[in-house]
Image: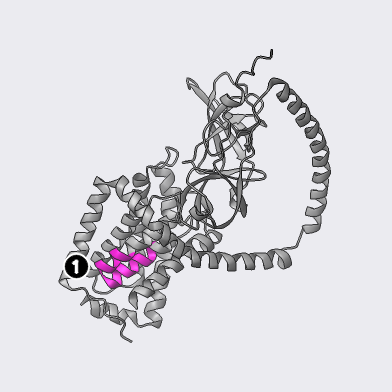
Amino acid sequence: MRMVNFRLSYNARRVAFALAVILVLSFLLLPTQLQTVFQAVGSPFGWVISWPLQAVAGIHDRIAGVWGQYVALQGVEEDNRQLRRELDLLKEQNGQLRESAAATERLAALLEFKQQALPTLIAAQVIGRDTGNWYKTIILNKGTSDGLQSDQGVITPAGVVGRIVKTTSSTSVVLLLTDPNNAIAGLIQRTRDEGIVGGTTHGTAQLKYIPLLSDARPGDRVVTSGLVGGFPRGLAIGTITRIDKEDEALFQSAELVPEVDPNHVEEVLVILPTSFPTEGERLKAPKTKR
Amino acid sequence: MKTLTYIALIAGIVSAQSVLLPHVSLWQVKPDLGFVAVCLIGLFGGELEGLLVGLVLGWAMSLFSAQDVLSAAIIKGCIGFIAGLAGRQVAYLTPPLLVIGLFTLSCLVGLITPVVLRLSAQQDVWWALWSVVLPQAALDALIGGSVYWLISRYFGLEQWVSEYRI
């Protein structure tokens, strides 16, 4: 059977060569401008491509659902027992935390701290992962038409997942906390030392630029500091497992186990940019009472 | 008709690459179906088709990745163009030769990509080589060779390729 004749004419070859040269030159000379044009044109293009992607993701979810509900039920009883034990423990902890929260509220009212505004959240579903191997990302089924933009924070009730780096009209790409190219402002909850949280090549996270005098230790929890955009203060990031202190280094760093396992996240919440008060605004001096 | 086929192919590859392949990845590395497709299209269709399909496919894949649009489109476009040029020099293409060619090209592209992307300091050349480039090149070559073998066995492509090259 003879297939379609792909033979190129001499002119077509010249066009191909000229096109290749022009593109490479534009890439070298106008990278930012071309990037903006391609990204802008890509939004509707991405919307078109997101249809088959969402269809495949839907079929995949159904198969996974059937598998999870009917086939992979081994060990569910043991899990159930374990979860009930954890629930009892958490109920007890919850009672204690409510007490602490009430006390904190009373003290905050006395000091006239500005209330931390609750962020507006949008729920989204994970429909895919990065198409390449260089970045650790997830793809969400919501985009600019739902109010999502680059640099917005993405969380689950357990903690931070990552931040949005790219959007089309109906999808968004979230760079995960465990990607080495990510950077989120973090704070050690016990010592109040700040640092930058990024990923590692081993799939864990790392808190960098901790002051040398900090007495951070394994087991300390790290939360968002709220100093830069995307995340309000106090969202769980992870727990320190190891402190790395090098001779003659200006800072120490810590390895973290993220609160959220990014490989198994299915639904997330995107934080919309409401005006979170910064730490400075929140803790500004109370008005003098007359 | 051919344009529609390519659009369907691009949509299918992007969907499979982001939804299905993460579940079948080896050592957390998945093959790049786009690379394989662009190479085969470049080989069989020539430089122009390889370049154009590569550009559009790279662009489409970058919309669902943190990789920047331009580098993705240009890298894939160049792959298609190079595959087209290479195909012109080969009179008879056997699956083992294709596997070796795909492996080599995938390694070269894999070594160039982190430099173009300016990844973090942790992701140096050795890490890239052992963690991403070699496994991905092996998977790409395996899949490309298998697809070529299947097509040539069941669609008589070998004869067509020979005629086209001569």
User: Residue shown at 31%/82% (left/top)?
Assistant: A3
Dividing the picture into quadrants, the one containing residue A46 is: bottom left
Dividing the picture into quadrants, the one containing residue A98 is: top right
> Magenta stretch containing residue B38, yes or no?
yes
- Image quadrant holding the C terminus of chain A, namely top right
Classified by dominant secondary structure, the portion drawn in magenta counts as helix
Residue type, mark 1 in image: Arg
Query: In the displayed structure, does residue B36 sit left or right of residue B82?
Result: right
Extreme residue toward the top, this view: A290
> Magenta stretch containing residue A55, yes or no?
no
User: At which x and y percent is residue A42?
Assistant: 39, 57
User: Residue shown at 62%/53% (left/top)?
Assistant: A267
Q: Which residue occupies the foreground of this view, B37 or A35?
A: A35
Q: Is residue A96 visible?
A: yes
- Above or below, B71 against B54 in this view is above
Q: Is residue B101 visible?
A: no
Q: Which residue occupies the foreground of this view, A90 or B75?
A: A90
User: At which x and y percent is residue B128?
Assistant: 42, 47
**Chain to which mark 1 belongs:** A
User: At which x and y percent is residue A233?
Assistant: 61, 33
- Above or below, B110 against A280 in this view is below
Q: Which residue is mark 1?
A: A13
Q: Which residue occupies the foreground of this view, B156 or A112?
A: A112
Extreme residue toward the bottom, this view: A1
Residues drawn in magenta: B35-53
User: At which x and y percent is residue A93?
Assistant: 80, 36
Q: Which residue occupies the foreground of this view, A88 or A38?
A: A38
